[in-house]
Amino acid sequence: MTEPDFLPFCRPTIGDEEIASVVESLKSGWITSGPKVLAFEARFRERLGVPHAVALNSATAGLHVALAALGIGPGDEVITTSLTWPSTLNMVELLGATSVFADVLPGTLMIDPEDVCRRITERTRAVVPVHYAGAPADLDALEAAIASAGRSGDRPIALIEDAAHALGTFYKGQEVGARKHTTVFSFHPIKNITTGEGGMVTTRDAELADRMRTLRFHGVSKDAWSRYGRSASPRYEVIEPGWKYNMLDLQAAIGVEQMKKLERFNGQRAEIAARYAEGLADVPEVRPLERVPYDHVHAWHLYIVRLDLESLSIDRDAFMGELGKLGVGVGLHFTPVHLHRFYAAKYGLEKGDLPHSEAAGEAIFSLPLYPLLTPPMQERVVDAVKQVVAANRKSRAR
Ligand SMILES: Cc1ncc(COP(=O)(O)O)c(C=O)c1O
């Protein structure tokens, strides 16, 4: 199969507007953090009705500065899901804190609030749910789990929403990012909007926002724009050691244009998801995830399916390989983090410790889902899935 025949798993939708906006930045003479980043942050504040939005060069950086700004470090525990990209856990580890894994609910693969509740200890400092695939985690139940720990004073338990998949997701009538919690978005090329790479943290906490801004840029009191801009003072001072995590204007130039298209993009994603549901309705071996049982709007970041491995003669990896041979790119979200070498060795976790995350980790994969996926392309995906199922169905007759 030649490359042009390959149907990619993801492809960003970049229009002339994004290109013009980047060219404008390039020609302006200001390409690092500056007016476009400020405009991009303002869009988030306005959209979500929150007072603070902090742009960074990735969601991973956002998780890092959010956890660090909360003062999380050695001796502290952070509870999250194992069915995620390793970012959160890696940032917890790099801060010297302890990762605690809660299992997911078997049908939706969303973090299980009851399991979170069971794992809260005196040392818990944060809970980080992932709004998995673009559906919302059950925030009311997670808030209740945290409240039941009865912690107050100088060691409250923070809820940080990992909304890398969830730009445009709504939970019970409220957009993700609009609640009182700190929320982290990603603009990696596969996401609902992209800036090439990028992230945004939104929060209602002014002190936290200030500290995150300092930490994203060397820990100095001022970024480049405030040092070299028109009314700037060149003096700066390190308040605490920080990272180099600032978003560039070149990235934000793409982001401001992408934000204008978010509703259209998410509408197209929802249509594609509906067509997959229809196209695969008669394929019991390949089931979509269950919908979360509360009022929500799904952002359809990913269309994850689960194989009924009992009825197939090949495993999930081989199934994905067969689709690749047919020229269809697919993704894997995710292999459970607690089974990765570092985490398994450090925490001594084994298969069986998080049964629902592990079972999903063996059986799920993601189909292509992006606005540029046309109905004929999608038919090709569905046909390929059906072909692989037909060729590898276990015969029932014995
Ligand atoms: C659930 C989740 N959290 C965090 C991230 C990290 O995002 P970024 O690549 O912007 O650092 C990802 C990336 O895919 C993700 O899927």
Image (tube, grey):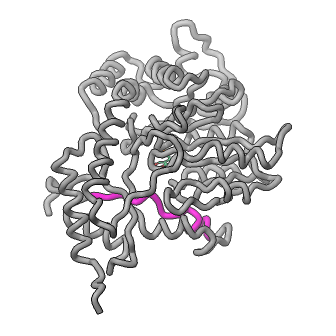
Image coordinates for residue 336, horizontal then vertical, percent: 53, 63
Residue 288: name its quadrant.
bottom left
In this rendered view, identify the residue nearer to me: 301 or 8: 301
Q: Is residue 339 magenta?
A: yes
Left or right: 193 as drawn, with respect to 203: left
- Give the position of the N terminus as an image quadrant: bottom left
Quadrant containing the C terminus is bottom left
**Residue plotted at (48% across, 63% down):** 335
Please report the bounds of the magenta region as a residue range. Answer: 329-344
Q: Position of residue 44 (x, y in %)?
A: 50, 25
Q: Nearer the viewer, residue 309 or 121?
A: 309
Instruction: Name the residue nearer the viewer: 249 or 5.
Output: 5
Residue at x-position 39% and y-position 50%: 302
Residue 60 magenta-drawn? no
Answer yes or no: is residue 48 visible: yes
* Towards the viewer: 253 or 178: 178
Where's residue 118, x and y in %?
Answer: 73, 59
Task: Give the side of residue 258 with respect to residue 182, left or right.
Answer: left
**Which residue is depicted at the point 65% across and 47% down?**
141
Query: So how many labels did they put on this image?
Result: 0
Residue lying farthest top? 231
Residue 218 in view, yes or no: no
Most distant residue in the right direction: 153
Instruction: Measuring from the top left, give residue 124's x and y in whole percent.
Output: 76, 51
**Which residue is depicted at the point 38% across and 68% down?**
307
The relative height of residue 395 versus residue 37 in the rendered view (above or below) is: below
Say if 27 sits above or below 280 in the image.
above
**Left or right: 388 as drawn, with respect to 90:** left
